[in-house]
Amino acid sequence: MENSSAFYKNSTDSSEFGPIPVSVSVIVFIVLILCIVIGGIGNFSTMVTIVRLPDHPKSSYYLIASISATHSLLCFFVMPVHMASLLVEDHELGGGLCDYSAYAAAILTTTANLLLCATALQRYISTMHPSCFGKVKSSKYTRGMIALSYLLPLMLFLVIKFAVLDEAPEYTPMDLNCKIATSSLLNFLLPVLYAPSTLIMLCSYLMLFYKIKKMRSTVAPVQDNLEVSTPTPMNDYIVKYQLRLTKTIFLILTEHCLTAICPGFMWLAAANSESDPRVLSILAILLMRMGPVFDVIIILVGNKFLRFRIKNLYAHIFGYDSSDPNSINWAV
């Protein structure tokens, strides 16, 4: 708690700086609209598409549906309330909204990261250890991973809320210390859950990448008298899968650098800033809340089947018929 107390002492009351600048309010509004339109609608469409699948989907799709449901809650409800609490001038109302929305956002963000990790781990085990394919693809295993992903952040939240934050000094709700609830929670969740799950996820995808590369060299070996191996359908499929896997790894790295590492440095700069620290703090929170947007892009870029099903879903909603030559060809 020493570091946390130091942060409290270095914070400055918002009344010394006046109202939040209009430019920051405009940025918050634009980012909120982007998150709701891209992150919220994209994740909700993915969840509805999986639920509407005619056959029982694979267990990995249950994990993706859980990720989409978590991000939908974050984009449609938690993030708008959190951002409004940072901009409202009513100290009592803003302070209460800030605390509870910050807790909810931190829990849902960590849950989604654990679900992404479970998806990567499932793919890794089923590919690298085919004998375990039946176990990791079973609905029982999937339900257990989903339950664990929700319970771990919630239990840690209860520990932090009642054992750590209750001992913190009093603060003015609309002071920069309003973000201490988020900061303290994430400072604990990031090293305990977020960082290890990200490391497991990236290691799983890198091992898969190595496995696919090895399969490619086995399927189409280079002959002595040829510079390039003869292309085959299997070789072509592996190359395409390898490229998709590379995109997935790149997007995951980018997303976690933007939404986890950068906000930490921005918060540190805000704590030691002599100017208005609220601007940097709000921008850091906005950056952290962009995770659902990046995650839905990761899911849809790496899964052609889901992209096609979502197109069909909207074709059904808006009355398009893919068999009609005058209508939009949704299968492209």
Image: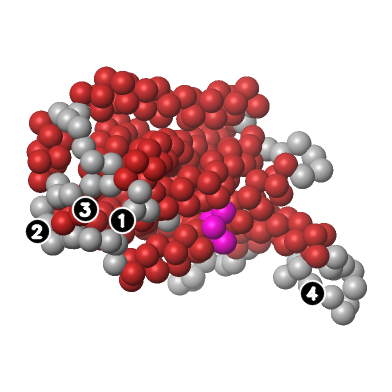
**Which x, y percent locates residue 133?**
60, 30
Residue 14, numbered label: 3
Q: Distance between the residues labelled 1 and 2?
A: 16 Å
Q: Does residue 208 appear left or right of residue 50 in this picture?
A: left
Label 1: state its secondary structure: helix
2 or 3: mark nearer the eye:
3
3 or 1: mark nearer the eye:
3
Q: Distance between the residues labelled 3 and 4?
A: 53 Å
**Which x, y percent locates residue 204?**
42, 41
Q: Label 3 amino acid?
A: Ser
Q: Label 2 amino acid?
A: Glu
What residue is pinned by disc 4?
328
Q: Label 1 amino acid?
A: Ile
Please tell me which of labels 4 and 2 falls first in the chain: 2
Please tell me which of labels 1 and 4 falls first in the chain: 1
Residue 282, numbered label: 1
Give, as a single range, the part of the protein colored magenta: 36-40
Whether residue 113 is visible, yes or no, is no
